[in-house]
């Protein structure tokens, strides 16, 4: 199905484009035809997922491919835990799709609106120093290359390409199918509580190593961290979920409804932000519940924001966050959104932010109606001092020249790009900036 391109905007309202046309293929073969037609016309072509990247990584000024019709389970092996999914499958559909097989994703981020291809291609991750990002779960992929070839990459077909294809930024081809290694369904015991920030930072590495999944949020203008500690339990463990009303109060009324009002008031009258932050600090946390993993990992986020996230060596997190705290105080900024701190295992995917090192993540946010430039630029300067690597789907100013020094296999990735997309059929301004022309 083909349509004239209307204006497309991402979720965070940081990027917009009017494609030449939009196509909605329903099969790998249809994607091949679309790529071949674009090549014949000399125009670019890109797939778009849910638009949850804050960068221009998915912008398609030429042909935009909507892969929503290439979704769902394509093959499943409950014995091995491997399931093949259409690339357009949204993460929030996975619990339903995997339920017949008794499987679950080993780890997830806190947002599940993304497509599986978009999430893995940008390096989406959760938290837990024993667990890699979602792309580490990929065991195979099928993609259409820039020459229109339908290429299979797995342990027996072109295995040398897997470390590049798992996290390919959309630069190597149009993913049409991904095979992931899932795990038996499991539950999580969640403990959420406010703690003194200095205490949490002082025991940062101890905390992340002692828990299956540990993260915290720090509300600027306060001295408190909201910690979240999740412990893995068998899938048949007794559940003690949040009640429907309690979940609505915390996750909808507080986290979205009331917080939207606070952000809007803070934008209109910045001076009230610190007071609001201290009130939010008092009203959040102190939850203890057990539920199946997707219901604990993910939350609904309807308040729009803009985000920058950097990956640092794990041990650098306390000092880096201390620098950010001082920046906010010294500059007199009024920041209504919390700073999010997580951790992940080292992995071997060439452009993974966790490539070759245990990683801590620091993410800063601003309400989408506020200008984030000054705050993000200053924080980015701090992150670069700690050998930080920017999340590919979140705002940053890095270029191919600066990124090459942070990724030992950067040029190996470019060689694969040259092989699979020699005419740069999948290029756009963002990829030209971060990978070069």
Image: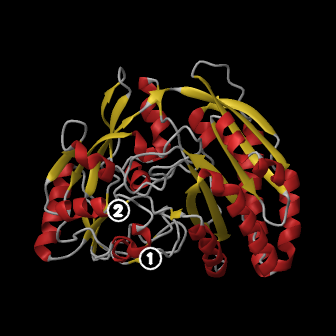
Q: Which residue position holds label 1?
A: 16
SS for dot 2: helix
> x%, y% of residue 410?
34, 62
> x%, y% of residue 159?
23, 42
Residue 211: mark in rendering: none
Q: Which residue position holds label 2?
A: 410
Name the residue rendered at 48%, 56% in the picture.
353
Q: Nearer the viewer, residue 199 or 28?
A: 199
In this figure, which colouring scheme has been used for the structure? Answer: secondary structure
> x%, y% of residue 332?
81, 79
| Label 2 crowd bin: few (<14), some (14–19), many (20+), radius 10 Å | some
Q: Nearer the viewer, residue 384 or 44?
A: 384
Q: Nearer the viewer, residue 138 or 399?
A: 399
**Does the rendering let one see residue 305?**
yes
Name the residue rendered at 68%, 24% in the picture.
239
Residue farthest along the left direction in this orientation: 40
Q: Earlier in the sequence, mark 1 or mark 2?
A: 1
> x%, y% of residue 407?
41, 61
Horizontal relation, residue 138 to residue 292: left or right: left
**Does the rendering let one see residue 265?**
no
| Label 1 crowd bin: few (<14), some (14–19), many (20+), radius 10 Å | some
Q: Quadrant of residue 320?
A: bottom right
Q: Nearer the viewer, residue 382 or 183?
A: 382
Q: Quadrant of residue 3?
A: bottom left
Q: CA distance from mark 1 to mark 2?
A: 28 Å
């Amino acid at each position: 199905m083909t349509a004239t391109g209307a204006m497309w905007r991402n979720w965070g309202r940081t990027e917009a484009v009017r494609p030449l046309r939009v196509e909605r293929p329903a099969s790998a073969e249809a994607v091949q035809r679309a790529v071949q037609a674009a090549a014949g016309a000399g125009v670019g072509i890109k797939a778009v997922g849910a638009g949850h990247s804050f960068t221009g990584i998915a912008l398609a000024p030429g042909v935009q491919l909507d892969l929503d019709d290439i979704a769902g389970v394509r093959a499943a092996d409950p014995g091995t835990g491997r399931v093949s999914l259409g690339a357009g499958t949204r993460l929030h559909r996975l619990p339903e799709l995997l339920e017949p097989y008794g499987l679950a994703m080993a780890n997830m981020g806190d947002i599940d609106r993304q497509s599986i291809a978009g999430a893995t291609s940008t390096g989406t991750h959760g938290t837990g120093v024993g667990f890699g990002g979602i792309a580490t779960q990929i065991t195979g992929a099928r993609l259409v290359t820039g020459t229109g070839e339908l290429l299979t990459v797995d342990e027996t077909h072109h295995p040398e390409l897997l470390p590049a294809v798992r996290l390919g930024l959309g630069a190597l081809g149009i993913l049409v199918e991904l095979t992931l290694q899932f795990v038996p369904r499991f539950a999580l015991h969640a403990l959420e509580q406010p703690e003194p920030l200095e205490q949490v930072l002082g025991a940062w590495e101890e905390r992340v190593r002692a828990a299956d999944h540990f993260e915290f949020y720090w509300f600027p203008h306060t001295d408190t961290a909201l910690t979240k500690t999740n412990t893995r339990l068998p899938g048949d463990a007794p559940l003690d979920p949040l009640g429907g009303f309690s979940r609505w109060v915390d996750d909808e009324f507080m986290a979205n409804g009331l917080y939207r009002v606070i952000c809007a008031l803070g934008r209109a009258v910045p001076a009230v932000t610190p007071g609001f932050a201290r009130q939010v600090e008092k009203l959040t946390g102190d939850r203890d519940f057990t539920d199946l993993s997707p219901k604990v990992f993910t939350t609904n986020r309807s308040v729009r924001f803009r985000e920058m996230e950097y990956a640092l060596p794990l041990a650098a997190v306390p000092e880096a966050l201390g620098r950010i705290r001082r920046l906010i105080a010294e500059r007199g900024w009024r920041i209504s959104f919390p700073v999010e701190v997580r951790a992940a295992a080292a992995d071997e995917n060439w452009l993974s932010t966790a490539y070759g090192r245990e990683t801590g993540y620091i993410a800063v946010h601003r309400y989408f109606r506020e200008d984030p430039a000054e705050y993000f630029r200053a924080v980015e300067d701090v992150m670069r001092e700690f050998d930080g690597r920017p999340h590919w789907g979140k705002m940053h100013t890095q270029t191919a020249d600066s990124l090459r020094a942070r990724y030992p296999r950067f040029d190996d990735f470019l060689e694969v790009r040259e092989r699979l997309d020699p005419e740069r059929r999948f290029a756009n301004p963002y990829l030209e900036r971060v990978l070069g022309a």
